[in-house]
Amino acid sequence: MPKCLYCQDENPPQEAECQNCGMPLPALADTAGARRQRSFLLFCIALTIFCAVMILWLPR
Ligand SMILES: [Zn+2]
C-alpha cells in the first residue's frame, strides 16, 4: 500500500495520485527520479565521448 508523503493516507496500489490530497505518490515519484538519473548518466557518457573525440580531433 503506497502511503502519501503529505497526508499519510494509504492508497491502493497502481494509484498515481493520492486519493485524499491529490499529490503524486512516492512509488511514481521514485520511478520518475530513476528515469531522470538514467538520462543524466547517458548525458555524462555522451559528454565524455564528445570530449575524447575533441582531444583526438583538435590540433595541439
Ligand atoms: Zn495525500
Image (spheres, grey):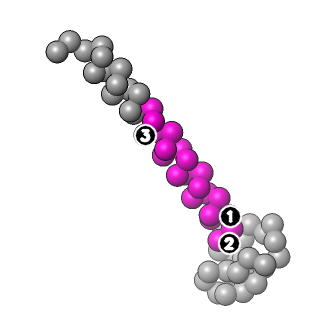
Q: CA distance from mark 1 to mark 2?
A: 6 Å
Rendered image quadrant of residue 28: bottom right
Residue mark closest to the camera, 1 vs 3: 3
- Answer left or right for 19 relative to 23: right
Q: In this orientation, which residue lies closer to the viewer: 51 or 8?
A: 51
Distance Cα–Cα, label 2 vs label 3: 29 Å
Q: Amino acid at mark 1?
A: Leu
Which residue sits at x=55%, y=47%? 38
Secondary-structure class at tag 3: helix
**Badge 3 is on which residue?**
44
Looking at numbered disc 2 in the image, what kind of residue is underneath it? Answer: Leu
Percent position (x, y) of residue 20?
73, 83
Residue range corresponding to the magenta coloring:
25-46
Tell me if mark 3 has few (under 14), some (14-19) or many (20+) residues whose alpha carbon lies within 10 angstroms of its own: few
| Residue situated in front as seen by the camera: 40 or 15 | 40
Q: Residue at x 54, y 51 (%)?
A: 36
Mark 1 residue element: helix
- Report the quarter where the C terminus lies: top left
Q: Is residue 28 within the magenta segment?
A: yes
- Residue 16 on the magenta span: no
Residue 42: % across, % down: 51, 39
Which residue position holds label 2?
A: 25
Q: Quadrant of residue 45?
A: top left
For residue 8, above or below residue 50: below
Residue at 35 percent of width and 20 percent of height: 53
Q: Is mark 3 within 8 Å of ligand 1?
A: no
Name above or below for residue 58 compared with residue 19: above
